[in-house]
Image (cartoon, rainbow, N blue to C red):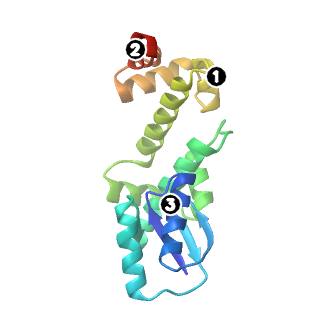
Amino acid sequence: MKFYIKNMVCNRCKMAVKAELEKAGLHPVSIELGEVEVDEEPDAATIKNLNNSLKQLGFEIIDDRKSRIIEQIKTAVISLIHYNGEQHNLNLSSYLSQQLNYDYGHLSSLFSEVEGSTVEKYYIAQKIEKVKELIMYNELNLSQIANQLGYSSVAHLSAQFKKQTGLTPTFYRSLKKNIRRNIEEL
């Protein structure tokens, strides 16, 4: 049986869900972001208990078709931004259509209807979060970050960053330095 699970976005999420499945006496065959397959057909009480324990961890079993597709869209975007190293010249609509086997127009209108925002805005928000993460690591300069995330230029990255956060990437980087203090300064 396959379960679709909301808010499963990282490897730690996969480990937490696996632990809850095992506590419920279920044996996972595969665990992917947003999807879990078990080798048995659990009864309704087991599913209800599993869902309650998952909710305590911030997850939720999705049982309606629309919500599953929305979660698959989110999972695909998160995987693309945070776990796929090469994104150069990627067409988001083609990528999502290919990953989910639906026409992008259908995916886009469904996402907008349910989420009240567009897939593109969600994609941009995820990219900006990744930019923030890379800025905080301070291992790459803005040009390298722009290149890694498929921006056409540092200016494009900066404009999008400022539109989303109200700050320039350079100013954001300088804030990080002021947030933490050395032990000697305490």
Q: Amino acid at mark 3?
A: Ala
Report the disc number at residue 116: none
Tell which circle, 2 or 1, labels the residue nearer the N-terminal end. Answer: 1
**Residue 14 in which image quadrant:** bottom right
Could you tell whether 64 is left or right of 73 in the image? left
Frontmost of labels 2 and 1 is 2
Position of the C terminus, as image quadrant, is top left
**Residue 150 in which image quadrant:** top right
Q: CA distance from mark 2 to mark 1?
A: 23 Å
**Looking at this view, is 179 or 155 the one in front?**
179
**What residue did someone put label 1 on?**
144
**What residue is rendered at 65% in x and 44% in y?**
84
Tell which circle, 3 or 2, labels the residue nearer the N-terminal end. Answer: 3
- Near mark 1 (Cα within 10 A), the count class, few <14, some 14-19 or many ≥20, is some
Could you tell whether 63 is left or right of 42 in the image? left
Q: CA distance from mark 3 to mark 2?
A: 34 Å
**What residue is rendered at 44% in x and 27% in y?**
160
**What residue did someone put label 2 on?**
178
Q: Amino acid at mark 1?
A: Gln
**What residue is rendered at 60% in x and 66% in y?**
31
- Near mark 2 (Cα within 10 A), the count class, few <14, some 14-19 or many ≥20, is few
**Looking at this view, is 115 or 2 the one in front?**
2
Residue 88 against residue 7 in the figure, above or below: above
Q: Quick check: can you spot residue 182?
A: no
**What residue did someone put label 3 on?**
16
Q: Secondary structure at mark 2?
A: helix
Tell which circle, 1 or 3, labels the residue nearer the N-terminal end. Answer: 3
Residue 46 against residue 12 in the figure, above or below: below
Could you tell whether 132 is left or right of 144 in the image? left
